Image: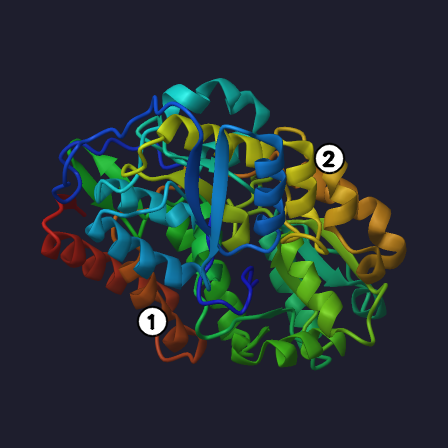
Amino acid sequence: MNSTSPRRRLTRAIAVGIALTGLLSACGGSGSGDASSAGPVTLQFWGWANGQEAVVKAFNAAHKDVQLKYTKVTDQLTMQKQLTNAVKAGNAPCLLQNTAEYVTSWVSQDALADISQYVDAGKDKFNAGSWAAGQVQGKIYGIPTASAPAFTIYRTDVFKKYGLKAPATWDDFIAAGKVLKKHGVHITNYAGEDPSTLEVLSMQAGAHWYAIDGKSWKVDFQDEGSLKAAKVIQTIIDNDLNSKLSFADYAAVQRNYDVGGTVTRQISTWQMSGMVQNFTKSFGDWALSPWPTFTGEAAKTPAGTNQSGNLTLVTKQCKSQKQAAEAALWMSTDTGAVKTMASPETGSGVMPALADSSSYVDAAISQKLLGDNYGPAKQVVTDSLGTITTDWTFGPDWTAMFTELQSGWGKVVAKQQTVAQLLAHMQEWTVNDLKSRGISVTG
């Protein structure tokens, strides 16, 4: 079920759609920047994704009055630190790459510019789930750079050997896991440091860990959706249907899949590259199937993971916000730029955030990995783009909350506490954390 890379966390392209007035800690100044700066301007752009330097070079070649100066940051966590320091020093870049879960926090810190007036006319070029990722209270703060198809990849040879079909529901998934267990095979892997499984299943089940109640944040880690997700996960753990391989040795995790020790993953397109790079035995034995549903419910996939939640954001300190917003829009819609980023060879191997990404599916999935299953897999990916949830909200203390969730998740995987106990702890912890930050909260 692990839908992330070996990195600590995932990122998610998701709607925030929340009222901020009175809900967040006090903000700084309210200057809007000089949106009408005339003449040639150079805009600083910070990012870390493969392919961005080539996109910047193409942008500069196509524009005379606006030029981008690219600085490659080490990774996502480094970006948070550097941006915090830059905002405090008053020298933040005009443009930066970031991920959906940080948008609310950065808006609360008065770090991002509302670019709605410059880019709203381009919203129809993007799919709804991706476009919503850069919004807070209906205002647009960033342009999505990637979408988040989500699906299951599974070992066809192992499933066929034991008379199993691709699981259509989580009940099917558990039933298949019990059959596989009899033969020493795990159906999924839960890394003790990666609670993304709990998050994405809660998201799919309709949970809302953060929401708005009047003029306060509402925290609810124990709603119906969260408990529904917890039941699935707890059943898998109680029955020992999962491997417990840490992403600290990512190659070892991949080898386990390659030899058939673990035989399914819930992933997005970009994670296939790691499988291709590490496999030696199972090429052609993998196929895609839709993300399992909860029994009796329509297809619904969680929004984004890690790279799929990327945005190009415009900072409030930028003195050329109009040009920055238009540059961000160009980088996500220009055909050449989109192809560069979508390709695993030249970019990051992520699906574009465009309303119609069908022409990029061929390049985004691996024929070497899927073999004869490559053709049907393209339709699975295309269909999944239409089932992405768009109503998940990231709270203003998301980073701290996720860190706390990580420590508890390790205990869940080790059977030292239940998922329900972890959710109860997160409820109390998150309410107290928000209160300690001076943020109005109920729950």
Say which element carries label 2: helix
233 in relation to 111, above or below:
below
Amino acid at dot 1: Gly
Amino acid at dot 2: Ser
Q: Residues within 10 Å of mark 1 (few under 14, many from 20)?
A: many
Between 48 and 280, the one lying in front of the other is: 48
Q: Position of residue 243 (x, y in %)?
A: 58, 77
User: Which color scheme did the rendering employ for the protein?
Assistant: rainbow
Say which element carries label 1: helix
Q: Position of residue 97 (x, y in %)?
A: 45, 48
Classify the position of the N terminus by image quarter. Answer: bottom right
Say which residue appears at 36% left-offset and 80% top-offset: 416
In the displayed structure, does residue 35 sit left or right of residue 179? left
Say which residue appears at 50% left-offset and 60% top-offset: 232
The residue sitting at the right extreme is: 372
Q: Position of residue 286 (x, y in %)?
A: 79, 62
In the displayed structure, does residue 349 sit left or right of residue 222? right
Give the CA separation, mark 1 to mark 2: 39 Å
Q: Can residue 290 be seen here?
A: yes
Between 25 and 302, the one lying in front of the other is: 25
Q: Position of residue 360 (x, y in %)?
A: 73, 40
Say which residue appears at 42% left-offset and 49% top-offset: 98
In the displayed structure, does residue 89 sit left or right of residue 81? left
| Residue identifier under label 2 | 358
Q: Residues within 10 Å of mark 2 (few under 14, many from 20)?
A: some
Q: Can residue 353 be seen here?
A: no
> Mark 2 or mark 1, which is nearer the start of the sequence?
2
| Residue identifier under label 1 | 408
